[in-house]
Amino acid sequence: MTTLFISDLHLDERRPQVTELFLHFLVTEAREADALYILGDLFEFWSGDDISNPLNDSIQDGLKALTDSGVKCFLVKGNRDFLVSKRFAKRTGITILGDYTVINLDGQKVLIAHGDTFCTLDEKYQAFRAAVNIPWRQKLFTCLPIFVREAIADKIRGHSQEGNQQKSMQIMDVTESEVVDKMQEYNCQILVHGHTHKPNIHDVQLSGDQIGKRIVLGDWFDQGSVLIWHDGQYDLQQRAFLKKA
Ligand code: LP5
Ligand code: MN
């Protein structure tokens, strides 16, 4: 059994190489896998399932072809694509998961999440997250004209980028105690998440002298990043952008 995990592609028409690599990934190694988990921030910003443009359409078509081929595909929403909803799920054949999900891989319980919920020291972000995770506000937002939605998102993205320059690395990284709490609450010794864009595999000190693993996926800004889980073994790998013909 082979399961793939990716996150933080931030697909954007201004980064065509990422889209090209992802579409290639969907028709090559993802096709050979049993399941694909996308752990959030697939898109730079998803303004609503009703928006059709070349990027959104090609990605949804690519995912649909993958699920039609029999590969199970799952999505955990990130802070950039929390507006992905039922219409997207129906069009792509993807199953949308909640903030925390436990999956069983070769007898091992693995907790998966986007990763933003572990950044508990980032109080401004957590307040922002709570404010935008209110269904009626989301509904109202998706009723706005597309250009208004995009203008609001651009404004907030700009605000976020400015703010991030002033936040310490510690604030923007996960809080270790929160990681331990969640791994223990869900009784998992392995956690896979994205969001921090700091690919790595960390030891986590759990109770009873147990050492868990926290696997952090990388972003796709300069290359692809994929975690391959195959028959109980895992490997965090990179994928180079495709060469121009
Ligand atoms: O994404 P990244 O890595 O840059 O930073 C994240 C956190 N930032 C975000 C915001 C996204 O970047 C932008 C998403 C667009 C949202 C559009 C919303 C539309 C409304 C929806 C319906 C109700 O997630 C950043 C974290 C960082 O990760 C590390 O974890 O620190 O958090 C922030 O930057 C949050 C700020 O600290 C608080 C934001 C306040 C926004 C105020 C808006 C004012 C402008 C209103 C314009 C109408
Ligand atoms: Mn994120």
Image (spheres, grey):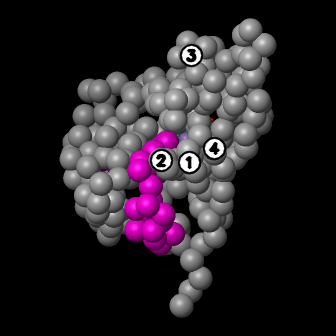
Frontmost residue, 1 versus 89:
1
Q: Does residue 16 appear in the picture of this structure? A: yes
- Apparent side of residue 205 relative to residue 160 in the rendered image (left or right): right
Residue at numbered disc 3: 187
The amino acid sitting under disc 3 is: Asn
Q: Residue at x 46, y 31 (%)?
A: 103
Highlighted range, magenta: 20-49
Could you tell which of marks 3 and 1 lies nearer the N-terminus? 3
Residue at numbered disc 1: 230
Could you tell which of marks 2 and 4 lies nearer the N-terminus? 2
Magenta stretch encompasses residue 87: no
Could you tell which of marks 4 and 3 lies nearer the N-terminus? 3
- Marks 4 and 3, how far apart at CA: 20 Å
Res 241 → quadrant: bottom right
- Apparent side of residue 75 relative to residue 189 in the rendered image (left or right): left
Extreme residue in the bottom direction: 245
Given this view, does label 4 or label 3 mark the residue nearer the observer? Answer: 4
Q: Quick one: label 3, few (<14), some, or many (20+) residues within 10 Å?
A: few
Residue at numbered disc 4: 233
